[in-house]
Image (cartoon, rainbow, N blue to C red):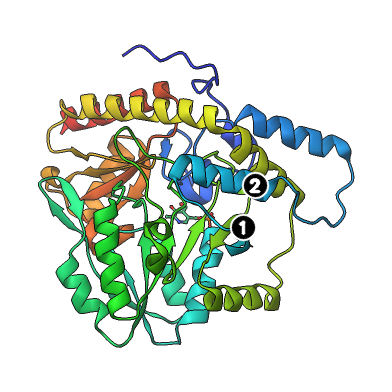
Amino acid sequence: MTPSKSEFSLDEDIDRSSVPALKVHPSVLGQYGEGLFAGGVADMDFKAPPVVLDALQKRLDHGVFGYETVPDGLLPALINWLSVRHSWRVDPTHILRAPNVLNALAIAASLFSEEGDGIIVQPPVFFDFFDILKENRRSLISNPLMLENGRYCMDFEDLEQKASDPRAKMIYLCNPHNPVGRVWTRDELRKLGDICARYDVLVVSDEIHGDITFSNHAFTPFSSLGLEYAANCISCLSPAKSFNIASCCSAFTVISNEGLRQAFQVENSRLTVNKNNAFASVAMEAAYRDGGEWLEATLNYLERNVELVRARLKDIPGVNLIEPEGTFLLWLDFRGLALQPDNLTAFLREKANWAVTRGQTFGPEGNGFARLNIACTRAKLDAALNNLANASAAG
Ligand SMILES: Cc1ncc(COP(=O)(O)O)c(C=O)c1O
């Protein structure tokens, strides 16, 4: 496959170890991790959009970084983005800023449930959900996804049963889903929303991957389904993944239910988490206002990376791609290799030189799988796939 020409130089190989990037840090790659393919931590190897870099540079050149309020252009840029890209009309008064998405999820848990209460999650799912539950002493109520004909779907019968448990106070919905790559349809979200409303289970929708969807798969913000759905939802969003600015942006919640929003606002004040970081504001505004073209080019690049993985895995027996509909995280099924979890980890790391995220990190349902981050240059991905093919051929 010939590398696609990109005006945004997504093919540029940037040394990430010259900054303390988590993806390539020894704390993630381990002591002897230098030669490994770093396909774990969920960020991209690409530079942020030029419009973001220019805006940050301009702000840096100003040189004064005293206390600031929210820039006038930020909310309009955000609202326009949600409306144009996702057909979601958001009232600006319903938006609250948050330091990051995980913080918003944790505040929702502590505000709208008590110690010992249950939070429903749908594994295999983003591992930090488990940590938040544990650290906030909430019980895990598991509603595992079902893998049917190579595609994950929700088990609504089980969800109904789990939601009817009086301990169940909320669900952490991962929309789109990390790691299985599903972009939930309107129908699926409505079904989930109806069940949750019936049993008074609050929907906390983590939509951090919402901008990253592939052809023919449109992201539906849960609250855009209608007023009654929005009334039972806390939507958590951020430009972190979309524009690769996780370390210099903040997140936001959209809460249309006034009671829930006020409670959230009071908690934000109590914890004093609502100070503005000038760089985060500038980066977010520029990204949402002018970053569309870059995102399109990046989605295109990612989709070509998916094609590469799909093509190469055809020649590697025992390894299957779960077709992604969105996110830059691929869920690979290694069960055909019939390896015990530790042996699979050792095979990937020691034979294939892959540092990817072990499936079991996402819950026991992830045994036999691994998550591969494809937001890297095509050349790097190609080399990693060569290594996997060689490791597989060597047995
Ligand atoms: C589903 C999901 N939610 C939240 C996060 C982290 O968000 P933040 O950095 O804004 O806390 C990630 C990062 O990988 C994620 O995949």
The correct choice, above or below, for 92 with respect to 200 in the image is: above
Category of crowding for the residue at label 1, using alpha-carbon neighbours closer than 10 angstroms: few (below 14), some (14–19), many (at least 20): few
Q: Nearer the viewer, residue 295 or 39?
A: 295
The answer to which quarter of the image holds residue 214 is: top left
The correct choice, above or below, for 242 with respect to 384 in the image is: below
The answer to which quarter of the image holds residue 334 is: top left
Residue 199 located left or right of residue 337: right
Q: Residue at x 47, y 25 (%)?
A: 297
The correct choice, above or below, for 35 with respect to 261 in the image is: above
Secondary structure under tag 1 reads: helix
- Label 1 beta carbon less than 8 Å to ligand 1: no
Residue 322 located left or right of residue 374: left
Q: Position of residue 236 (x, y in %)?
A: 50, 60
Residue type beneath disc 1: Pro
Residue 254 located left or right of residue 167: right
Which label belongs to residue 309? none
- Label 2 beta carbon less than 8 Å to ligand 1: no
Q: Quadrant of the N terminus?
A: top left
Look at mark 1 in the image and give the residue it sits on.
92
Q: Disc 1, disc 2: CB below 8 Å?
A: yes
Residue type beneath disc 2: Pro
Q: Position of residue 131 (x, y in %)?
A: 43, 69
Q: Quadrant of the C terminus?
A: top left
Q: Position of residue 209 (x, y in %)?
A: 43, 48
Q: Residue at x 56, y 65 (%)?
A: 103
Q: Residue at x 44, y 54 (%)?
A: 207
Secondary structure under tag 2 reads: helix
Q: Position of residue 34 (x, y in %)?
A: 48, 36
Q: Residue at x 64, y 27 (%)?
A: 50
Look at mark 2 in the image and give the residue it sits on.
76
